[in-house]
Amino acid sequence: MDFKKNLPIVIIGLAILVLIPVAYYALKPPQAAQSGYTNQQPSSYSQQQLPRSSAGSPGGASTTAPQSSEPVSSKDPATLVPDGTTLDQYCEKYYSAWKNGDWQTAYDMQPLSKKKDGDVNSFADSRKSYGLTSYEIGKPQINGNVGIVVVKMDLGVNSTWAANWTFVKNDKGQWTVQGSTSGPSQ
Protein backbone atom coordinates (compact mmCIF):
# COMPACT_ATOMS: atom_id res chain seq x y z
CA MET A 1 0.00 0.00 0.00
CA ASP A 2 1.48 3.30 -1.10
CA PHE A 3 1.02 5.86 1.73
CA LYS A 4 1.55 8.91 -0.50
CA LYS A 5 -1.16 7.78 -2.95
CA ASN A 6 -3.73 7.11 -0.22
CA LEU A 7 -3.08 10.21 1.91
CA PRO A 8 -5.41 12.53 -0.10
CA ILE A 9 -8.20 9.93 0.06
CA VAL A 10 -7.78 9.57 3.84
CA ILE A 11 -7.84 13.37 4.32
CA ILE A 12 -10.97 13.74 2.18
CA GLY A 13 -12.65 10.89 4.07
CA LEU A 14 -11.87 12.45 7.45
CA ALA A 15 -13.11 15.85 6.26
CA ILE A 16 -16.42 14.30 5.19
CA LEU A 17 -16.78 12.52 8.53
CA VAL A 18 -16.27 15.83 10.37
CA LEU A 19 -18.55 17.85 8.07
CA ILE A 20 -21.55 15.50 8.22
CA PRO A 21 -22.42 16.22 11.90
CA VAL A 22 -21.67 19.93 11.44
CA ALA A 23 -24.02 20.11 8.45
CA TYR A 24 -26.69 18.11 10.30
CA TYR A 25 -26.75 20.49 13.27
CA ALA A 26 -26.50 23.57 11.08
CA LEU A 27 -29.49 22.54 8.95
CA LYS A 28 -31.61 21.08 11.77
CA PRO A 29 -34.54 23.37 12.69
CA PRO A 30 -34.37 24.80 16.22
CA GLN A 31 -36.26 22.92 18.93
CA ALA A 32 -38.50 25.94 19.50
CA ALA A 33 -39.68 25.92 15.87
CA GLN A 34 -40.59 22.25 16.15
CA SER A 35 -42.87 23.01 19.12
CA GLY A 36 -44.70 25.83 17.36
CA TYR A 37 -42.66 28.78 18.61
CA THR A 38 -40.34 30.98 16.65
CA ASN A 39 -37.10 32.48 17.83
CA GLN A 40 -38.11 35.86 16.46
CA GLN A 41 -38.90 38.61 18.90
CA PRO A 42 -41.86 40.90 18.36
CA SER A 43 -40.76 43.99 16.49
CA SER A 44 -40.80 46.54 19.31
CA TYR A 45 -38.87 44.45 21.82
CA SER A 46 -35.39 45.74 22.42
CA GLN A 47 -32.90 43.01 23.22
CA GLN A 48 -35.31 41.51 25.76
CA GLN A 49 -37.55 38.52 25.21
CA LEU A 50 -40.26 37.01 27.33
CA PRO A 51 -39.38 33.49 28.35
CA ARG A 52 -41.01 30.82 26.22
CA SER A 53 -43.45 28.47 27.81
CA SER A 54 -42.44 25.01 28.82
CA ALA A 55 -46.10 23.98 28.81
CA GLY A 56 -47.27 21.30 26.44
CA SER A 57 -49.38 23.47 24.15
CA PRO A 58 -48.19 26.12 21.74
CA GLY A 59 -49.23 29.43 23.20
CA GLY A 60 -48.19 28.38 26.66
CA ALA A 61 -51.62 27.96 28.18
CA SER A 62 -52.01 24.56 29.72
CA THR A 63 -54.84 24.55 32.23
CA THR A 64 -54.01 21.31 33.96
CA ALA A 65 -51.73 21.02 36.97
CA PRO A 66 -48.69 18.73 36.87
CA GLN A 67 -49.24 15.11 37.89
CA SER A 68 -46.93 15.17 40.94
CA SER A 69 -48.81 16.59 43.87
CA GLU A 70 -46.13 16.29 46.55
CA PRO A 71 -45.63 19.31 48.82
CA VAL A 72 -42.28 21.07 48.78
CA SER A 73 -40.18 21.46 51.90
CA SER A 74 -40.83 24.58 53.97
CA LYS A 75 -37.06 24.61 54.63
CA ASP A 76 -36.40 25.43 50.96
CA PRO A 77 -36.37 29.15 50.21
CA ALA A 78 -39.40 30.21 48.17
CA THR A 79 -41.64 33.15 47.42
CA LEU A 80 -44.73 32.63 49.58
CA VAL A 81 -48.31 33.55 48.75
CA PRO A 82 -49.58 35.61 51.72
CA ASP A 83 -52.10 33.86 53.99
CA GLY A 84 -55.67 34.62 52.94
CA THR A 85 -54.67 35.37 49.33
CA THR A 86 -56.00 33.11 46.58
CA LEU A 87 -53.77 32.16 43.66
CA ASP A 88 -55.72 34.30 41.20
CA GLN A 89 -55.63 37.24 43.63
CA TYR A 90 -51.85 36.83 43.81
CA CYS A 91 -51.56 36.96 40.02
CA GLU A 92 -53.93 39.94 39.89
CA LYS A 93 -51.69 41.83 42.32
CA TYR A 94 -48.58 40.98 40.27
CA TYR A 95 -50.02 42.12 36.93
CA SER A 96 -51.63 45.20 38.48
CA ALA A 97 -48.22 46.17 39.89
CA TRP A 98 -46.60 45.54 36.50
CA LYS A 99 -49.20 47.59 34.61
CA ASN A 100 -48.95 50.45 37.14
CA GLY A 101 -45.14 50.47 37.17
CA ASP A 102 -44.84 49.29 40.79
CA TRP A 103 -41.69 47.38 39.89
CA GLN A 104 -40.56 46.53 43.43
CA THR A 105 -43.88 44.84 44.25
CA ALA A 106 -43.92 42.87 40.99
CA TYR A 107 -40.26 41.90 41.34
CA ASP A 108 -40.77 40.68 44.91
CA MET A 109 -43.70 38.48 43.81
CA GLN A 110 -41.72 36.52 41.23
CA PRO A 111 -40.53 32.97 41.86
CA LEU A 112 -37.05 32.90 43.40
CA SER A 113 -35.71 31.28 40.22
CA LYS A 114 -36.60 34.44 38.26
CA LYS A 115 -34.95 36.80 40.76
CA LYS A 116 -31.50 35.38 39.97
CA ASP A 117 -31.79 36.90 36.48
CA GLY A 118 -31.23 40.43 37.80
CA ASP A 119 -32.25 43.13 40.21
CA VAL A 120 -35.43 45.21 40.33
CA ASN A 121 -34.00 47.77 37.88
CA SER A 122 -33.22 45.23 35.16
CA PHE A 123 -36.61 43.62 35.82
CA ALA A 124 -38.33 47.00 35.34
CA ASP A 125 -36.39 47.80 32.18
CA SER A 126 -37.30 44.49 30.58
CA ARG A 127 -41.00 44.65 31.54
CA LYS A 128 -41.39 48.21 30.24
CA SER A 129 -40.38 47.04 26.77
CA TYR A 130 -43.13 44.40 26.57
CA GLY A 131 -45.96 46.91 26.21
CA LEU A 132 -48.51 45.33 28.58
CA THR A 133 -51.87 47.01 27.89
CA SER A 134 -54.24 44.59 29.64
CA TYR A 135 -54.43 41.12 31.13
CA GLU A 136 -56.99 38.49 32.09
CA ILE A 137 -56.46 36.20 35.07
CA GLY A 138 -57.84 32.68 34.68
CA LYS A 139 -59.44 30.56 37.37
CA PRO A 140 -56.89 28.52 39.37
CA GLN A 141 -56.70 24.84 38.43
CA ILE A 142 -55.75 22.95 41.58
CA ASN A 143 -54.65 19.31 41.72
CA GLY A 144 -53.77 18.38 45.30
CA ASN A 145 -50.82 20.54 46.36
CA VAL A 146 -50.24 22.01 42.88
CA GLY A 147 -52.05 24.99 41.41
CA ILE A 148 -51.81 26.53 37.95
CA VAL A 149 -53.10 29.96 36.98
CA VAL A 150 -53.16 30.96 33.31
CA VAL A 151 -52.93 34.66 32.53
CA LYS A 152 -53.59 36.12 29.08
CA MET A 153 -51.61 39.29 28.40
CA ASP A 154 -52.32 41.81 25.67
CA LEU A 155 -48.94 43.27 24.76
CA GLY A 156 -50.35 45.73 22.22
CA VAL A 157 -48.27 45.68 19.04
CA ASN A 158 -46.33 42.74 20.50
CA SER A 159 -49.36 40.43 20.24
CA THR A 160 -51.13 38.35 22.86
CA TRP A 161 -49.16 36.11 25.21
CA ALA A 162 -50.19 33.55 27.82
CA ALA A 163 -48.39 32.96 31.11
CA ASN A 164 -48.62 29.89 33.31
CA TRP A 165 -47.99 30.43 37.01
CA THR A 166 -47.21 27.29 39.00
CA PHE A 167 -47.80 27.21 42.75
CA VAL A 168 -47.03 24.30 45.08
CA LYS A 169 -47.99 23.98 48.73
CA ASN A 170 -45.19 23.38 51.17
CA ASP A 171 -45.29 20.91 54.06
CA LYS A 172 -46.83 23.64 56.27
CA GLY A 173 -49.76 24.08 53.85
CA GLN A 174 -48.54 27.45 52.50
CA TRP A 175 -48.68 28.15 48.78
CA THR A 176 -45.25 28.84 47.24
CA VAL A 177 -44.59 30.45 43.86
CA GLN A 178 -42.59 27.85 41.96
CA GLY A 179 -42.50 29.16 38.43
CA SER A 180 -43.97 31.25 35.67
CA THR A 181 -43.53 30.66 31.98
CA SER A 182 -44.97 32.55 29.05
CA GLY A 183 -45.21 32.37 25.32
CA PRO A 184 -47.19 33.62 22.34
CA SER A 185 -50.89 32.84 22.59
CA GLN A 186 -52.67 31.18 19.71
Image: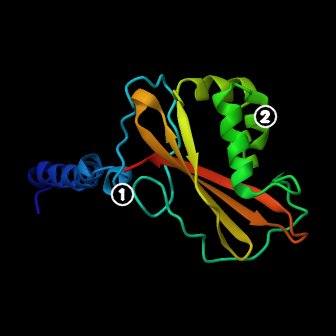
Using the rendered view, name the quadrant where residue 68 is placed.
bottom right
Residue 156 percent coordinates (x, y)? 44, 29
Residue 151 percent coordinates (x, y)? 56, 49
- The crowd level at tag 2 (other Cα within 10 Å; few <14, some 14-19, many 20+) is some
Which of the colour schemes (rainbow, by chain, secondary structure, one colour) is used?
Answer: rainbow
Residue 113 percent coordinates (x, y)? 71, 48
Foreground of the two, 53 or 13: 53
At horizontal 72% and vertical 23% (from top left) the residue drawn is 121
How far is mark 2 from mark 1, CA to CA?
A: 33 Å
Left/right placement of residue 124 relative to residue 157 reads: right
Give the residue at mark 1. Answer: 35
Say the numbered circle drawn on residue 79. Answer: none
Using the rendered view, name the quadrant where residue 106 is placed.
top right
- The crowd level at tag 1 (other Cα within 10 Å; few <14, some 14-19, many 20+) is few
Q: Vertical placement of 134 versus 164: above or below?
A: above
Residue 16 percent coordinates (x, y)? 19, 52
Q: Inspect the image, locate mark 2, and give the three-letter code of the amino acid beneath it.
A: Thr
Mark 1, secondary structure of its residue? loop
Left/right placement of residue 70 relative to residue 83 reads: left
At horizontal 11% and vertical 63% (from top left) the residue drawn is 1
Q: Earlier in the sequence, mark 2 or mark 1?
A: 1
For marks 2 and 1, give the one nearer the viewer: 2
Foreground of the two, 147 or 39: 147
Q: Inspect the image, locate mark 1, and give the three-letter code of the amino acid beneath it.
A: Ser
Mark 2, secondary structure of its residue? helix
At horizontal 37% and vertical 40% (from top left) the residue drawn is 39
Give the residue at mark 2. Answer: 105
CB under 8 Å between callouts 2 and 1? Answer: no
> Total marks drawn?
2
